[in-house]
Image: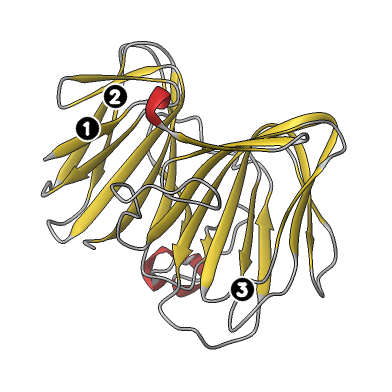
Amino acid sequence: MIRVRRAETLGAVRSETFELRCHFAFATYQDPVHQHDGQLRVLNLGALRPSETYSLGAEAAVDILTWVQAGSLTAQIEDFAPEVIQTEGLHLISTGSCCQTLGWKAGAEGATFLQFWFLADTEDGLARQESRKRFSQADDGGFRVLASGFPEDDPEEWGTITDGAPVTLSAGVRLLHATIRAGEGAAYNTTLARDLYLVVVSGVVRVEGTILNAGDAVTVRSVVTLAVMADERAVVLLADVAVG
């Protein structure tokens, strides 16, 4: 089963300095139909003006992943050193039992980004942050795990540590990335007990014969293999969560 969410149907939260396009209810955007997808609680497409900051108040028991589409961001999280995230870099703040202040400041060129919030498996623990530069092997056409809460995705389990190791999450979920050349495809294998939420960052793809353009998303359920074909060179991000 697939359910398409077109870019023009997304919610919006705006201020003088930033704009968020929201896949699920968030802040002033209230939507009883689109509350979450399993442990994927928030997916926002953000745009920040140069040198401006997007800030949040206290949050608990959530993993917030920020992937920079263009420009740069500096994560400014309570009790942590600032972390600069360049284009295609990834930042995690795992809020643990509570994190009081969270902020992301755009560089001089501004920034566009996608931010995923995953509900943690536990409300306990200390807050922590982790970041990665652009994943060097993310252009090979296949899906690459950017972040995961599954031990088998951690190269420490296999004794092979690399700079491109996935960010460690507090929930049994994955965030994946694929860059797909025009006329080619990428496949991801899962189980029937999982929900997949695919968002098209750029380009044009097909899923189950449905055309998706930049900004569109699709929920895919009850499949073992997700196949994504690119009509134009495309970048996609995929969230894999337990059925909610």
Residue at the (59%, 84%) spot, across then down:
97
Instruction: Assign the N terminus to one quadrant of the image.
Output: top left
68 left or right, relative to 195: right
Amino acid on which the number 3 mark rests in the picture:
Thr
Label 2 SS: strand
Q: Which residue corresponds to the image point at 41% horizontal and 63% vertical from the top-left?
A: 153
Report the front residue among 125 and 224: 125
User: Helix, strand, or loop for circle 3?
Assistant: loop
Kindly identify which residue carries mark 1. Answer: 227
Looking at the rendered structure, the secondary structure element under dot 1 is strand
Kindly report which numbered mark, 3 or 1, lies closer to the viewer in this rendering.
Answer: 3
Query: Where is mark 3, residue-wise?
Result: 95
- Identity of the amino acid at label 2? Gly
Q: Which residue is mark 2?
A: 185
The kind of residue on which mark 1 rests is: Ala
Q: Is residue 116 above or below residue 119?
A: above
Q: In the figure, residue 51 lies in which quadrant? A: top right
